[in-house]
Amino acid sequence: MAKTWVKSSIGAITIEADGSERKRTFNNIRADAADEKIATFGNILSTLTGQPTSKVQLTSVNSVG
């Protein structure tokens, strides 16, 4: 069976000043996104929002068949 990449997205959770979590999703991520670039994206998001990023997760959707 062949596996074909369909799409990828990044989910990021930042911590608000009051301690609550804010979830953000970024779509249309490249199929070959490297781990270090995803981690760097989390750091950039923290800088832009002024809030710490607690989690960055890559989700890929593949078609098998």
Image (cartoon, grey):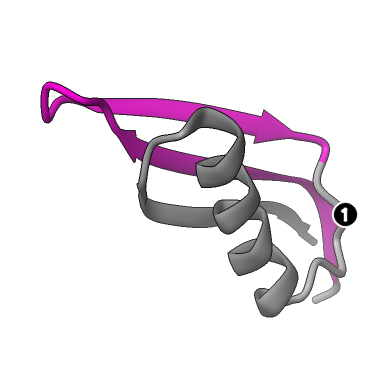
Count of all numbered marks drawn on residues in the image: 1
Vertically, is 1 above or below 9?
below
How packed mark 1 is, by other alpha carbons closer than 10 Å (few <14, some 14-19, many 20 or more), is: few
Based on the picture, tell me whether residue 22 belongs to the magenta stretch: yes
Q: Name the one closer to the observer, 60 or 2.
A: 60
Location of the N terminus by quadrant is bottom right
Give coordinates of residue 25: x percent, y percent: 56, 30
Give coordinates of residue 8: x percent, y percent: 72, 47
Q: Look at 85% across and 61% down and name the residue there.
A: 31
Q: Name the one closer to the observer, 6 or 29.
A: 29
Query: For the residue marked with disc 1, what is the amino acid?
Result: Arg
Residue at the spot of label 1: 30
Q: Look at 57% across and 57% down and name the residue there.
A: 43
Question: Can residue 38 be seen from the camera position used here?
Answer: yes
Q: Look at 66% across and 76% down and name the residue there.
A: 35
Q: Is residue 19 left or right of residue 61?
A: left
Based on the picture, tell me whether residue 46 belongs to the magenta stretch: no
Location of the C terminus by quadrant is bottom right
Main SS, magenta residues: strand
Q: Secondary structure at mark 1?
A: loop
Q: Is residue 53 left or right of residue 18?
A: right
Q: Name the one closer to the observer, 1 or 35.
A: 35
Q: What residue span does the magenta drawing correspond to?
A: 3-28
Give coordinates of residue 39: x percent, y percent: 59, 67
Q: Look at 84% across and 57% down and name the residue there.
A: 5
Give coordinates of residue 45: x percent, y percent: 59, 42
Question: Can residue 59 be seen from the camera position used here?
Answer: no
Q: Name the one closer to the observer, 48 or 1.
A: 48
Q: Is residue 45 left or right of residue 61?
A: left
